[in-house]
Amino acid sequence: MDPTMDIAVVFSLLNAAVLLVLLAMYSTIVLRTRASYPASLMIFSSLLLVQNLLTAYSYLAMTNFFGATVLPYLAIISMLQFGGLVALTRITL
């Protein structure tokens, strides 16, 4: 497998890990406050978690179908999403 694809898979899995942390934080807030906004963020985090897990799986299962010219874009998208999720986690703390 191409190293660029490995980077995309690793960052997709890191995104999933950060989303699990966010999901835990939002659920704690919902249980303490019963607020609806963090509950909505829980739904958002859950859907984004499923998307990232499916993305990592598809990258691994369908590596041969991705052309070499697309791989840097896939890696960059995963890295940018990771940066956004880390910033969101930092703000939520």
Image (cartoon, helix red, strand yellow):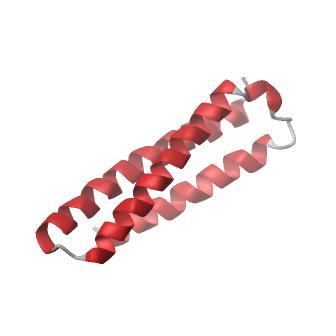
- Quadrant position of residue 35: bottom left
Q: Nearer the viewer, residue 29 or 18?
A: 29
Residue 19 as seen in the image, left or right of residue 4: left
- Quadrant including the C terminus: bottom left
Instruction: Decide which of 82, 53 is in the foreground and name it.
Output: 53
The residue sitting at 15% across, 64% down in the picture is 31
Figure label count: 0
The answer to whether 5 is drawn above or below residue 86 in the figure is above
Q: Name the residue rendered at 20%, 67% in the picture.
A: 29
| Quadrant in which the N terminus is drawn | top right
Q: What is the x, y in percent for residue 10?
A: 55, 37
Q: Quadrant of residue 39?
A: bottom left
| Residue 30 appears left or right of 10 | left
Query: Up-down: is 36 above or below 50?
Result: below
Residue at figure coordinates x 34%, y 58% from the top left: 22
Q: Is residue 38 left or right of residue 55?
A: left
User: Where in the figure is residue 28, as x and y percent of width and height?
Assistant: 19, 61
| Residue found at the far left of this picture | 32
Q: Give the image location of residue 82, x and y in percent.
A: 52, 55
Residue at image point 17% right, 73% down: 34
